[in-house]
Image: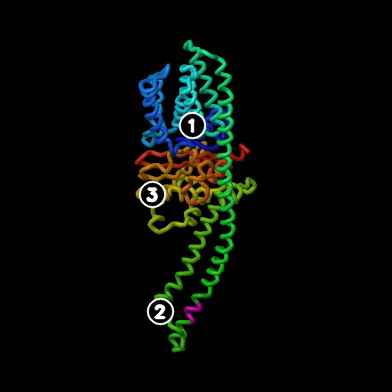
Amino acid sequence: MELTGPNIASPRSKDVARSQLMQIVGRSYHLVERNLIAISVCGAVGMPLYYFIWHDIFPQPYENLTMRLIGAGMCLPFLLKDFWSEKLQKFAPIFWYATVLYVLPFFFTFMTLKNDFSAVWLASFIAALLLLVFLVDWLNLIFLSMLGMLLAWTVFAATGGAVSDPSVYLQLMPIVIFVLIVGTIFSYRSEMLKQERLDAMRTAGRNLSHELRSPLLGIRTSAMSLAQYLPLLLQTYELAEEGGLPVGEIPPAHRSALRHSLVRLQEETVHANTVVEMLLRNSGGVPIDPAEFNVVSMAECVKRALKRYPFKSEKERKLVKVQLTSDFTFYGSESAMIYVILSLLKTLLISRDKQGKGEVLLELTKMSQQNQLRFLIIGGGKPINRNYSHFFDGSSVLDSESGTGPALEFVRRAVEAFSGALAIEAVRGEHTEIVISLPSPVASMAAE
């Protein structure tokens, strides 16, 4: 199970450094995850294939089949990454990082040195750097290229390697620096464009939400007014009809529909307003204000969220089971927690619909140190998201399919504001679980 969010106790500096390193590595993995299988096929096939090209068809001064097979072997496991166990999934970003380091900057630098800067390997080396530009962000581009070249030079020198003309080092340096600078600018600009798209989505979501709230409120107010007087009008019509007065005909079925239509209209406006509020919160339109925090019952939050959730049908409503016997309190905002529950419930129900099976369970667990609200899809088949490290991250905003606005970033921000932590776990064919862990109100207020 992978945790996101701060721990209750202050982490040690070593843990903070490890966490930051994992974020950098995870971000590199996230950038290529969608194309990981295609990239792995290229590496697994290309590494041994080019051995025969440079060894037999166009012989080069130096070739090494063992090193190429190691590189191909490092790429092969990613072809089956969707079938990895959950324990291996946690280490996938680290393994991918090591694979990129070995296959691109290290291997191509070492082979260029061993081939005494031949034209073929100079071109291959530059191509490898350009490929690295498209695979990683600007920070990882600088780190991986520098580390890979340094390791390659170290191994080259340790094995007694030497080049015939040392001045080639200086001649090649301007080209390498140019590629790295241009690649860094390109990668950084790409990240800025993605952030601009994200900001535009959030702005559009906030504007749309604000524009929809007033009409929905007006419709709801009108429906409440009609609900107060329409029964009286229908009763008057029936009395007039019984008295033989000349009134237009309204079939009994239509009268019955009119009596119930206003109730449905009010329910639909409440549901629509809930979705708009979820969109507004997820887009950052409603800030989380610590000044509004107080001691809140989690069971009450769950009950109110289920009452407000816009279920598509009674059948969908029956798919959601709750176990609220172990109620607990936390220090935070009731309204924010309700929308956290709504967002996660919507995400899990969408995942359940895609699989066509399973039930959603909400369960409260009271513990000595931390209390938990657990969301589970039992028997839901395929996990909801293989890239757990970015599931609640703003970097996954553009990939969101929850229908609740930009990704689930609001969920993460709210839980962190309550001094809590998030965890997500999935076992193929068995269950998908999201856990919100929160400290007791006393511990939370003491931490502040």
> Callout 1: 10 Å neighbours few (<14), some, many (20+)?
few
The mark found on residue 354 in the picture is 3
Mark 2 and mark 3: span between their CA atoms?
42 Å
The amino acid pointed to by label 2 is Pro
What residue is disc 2 on?
A: 251
> What residue is shown at x 36% (from left), y 39% (from top)?
428
- Is tag 1's residue or tag 3's residue first in the polypeptide sequence? 1
The mark found on residue 131 in the picture is 1
Whether the magenta-drawn stretch holds residue 233 is answered as: yes
The amino acid pointed to by label 3 is Lys
Whether the magenta-drawn stretch holds residue 255 is answered as: no
- Residue 364 placement (x, y as % from top left): 46, 45
- Is tag 2's residue or tag 1's residue first in the polypeptide sequence? 1
> What residue is shown at x 53% (from left), y 69% (from top)?
223
Say above or below: 176 vs 227: above
Q: How many marks?
A: 3
Q: Quadrant of residue 139?
A: top right
The mark found on residue 5 in the picture is none
Question: Tag 2, which secondary structure?
Answer: loop
- Are the residues tagged 1 and 3 within 8 Å (C-beta)? no
